Image (cartoon, rainbow, N blue to C red):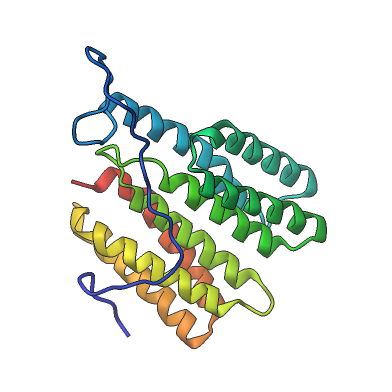
Amino acid sequence: MKFRTTALAFAVLAFASTGGCRQEQPGAANATQSSGAPAPAEAAARHAAFLAAAMPFKALAEQAQTANDATLKALIGAARKAADGVSTKLDASKDVILRQQLKAIDAARASGERTDLALGAAECFRILASEAPDNGRVPVAVNLLDYAGFRYRAALSASPARWSNAEGAIRFAQRQWAGLSGQVADPDLRNAVIASLDDMHNASTSHDAAAGRKAANRALDLIDRLGANLH
């Protein structure tokens, strides 16, 4: 079954980004705009802070399956430090969920469950990346496509593969892509992403883990190119 970019729907747990609003102060150069949205400087600072905090979790999700114990310990430490640095900027309910995922990562490391560790890292990446407002260059959806790829690949690393989780990840990816595909300037890149997402879907439908991992790796490589090919 092939997906069309105009009719792709997903149902997974995803958290909506909410930029903090502050009361406008007379004469303040960086005051919140009357619309209630953060002023440009404030939004830019928030974007940078949350993306910086998310990146160690991206590294952890990418390496969770292959890193040796010493590297894994360092990756988890860096990720936890990054999360602590933005904890006070998160909505309290989201911070609770982030802390729960960090505990799950620690438990997975202690038990040697690398799949659960990778999934926990992917969820932390999603939570933090979702908090970075669109900055006009790289939409949040690009990072959320990364999340979906990490989640899908981690689900297929389990034995047996966690097909329900993989199917949820591809549905989530298609939802992000539906809102982003029209912004991709390079038609060859756009078609390649569509094909890789189709391949991920087909692999999950046929329960072909090898094909699914190959398609996910291809999709993640393509997603890395999206930021420079948007209009």
Residue 60 seen anywhere in this rendered image of the structure: yes
What x and y, as percent, mark residue 145? 40, 57
In front of the other: 211 or 136: 136
210 relative to 32, above or below: below
Which sits in the foreground, 75 or 38?
38
Quarter of the image that includes the N terminus? bottom left
Quick check: 76 left or right of 180?
Answer: right
**Residue at image location 37% in from the left, 56% down from the top:** 222
State the image quarter where residue 47 is shown.
top left
Q: Choose top left, top right, bottom left or bottom right for residue 46.
A: top left
| Closer to us: 11 or 147 | 11
> How many numbered badges does the structure rendering display?
0
Across and down, in percent, residue 15 comes to: 43, 55
Q: Position of residue 208 (x, y in %)?
A: 53, 82
At a point 41% along the width and 77% down the height, the residue shown is 201
Task: Please report the residue visible at 33 percent of the width from the left and 34 percent of the height from the top.
Answer: 21
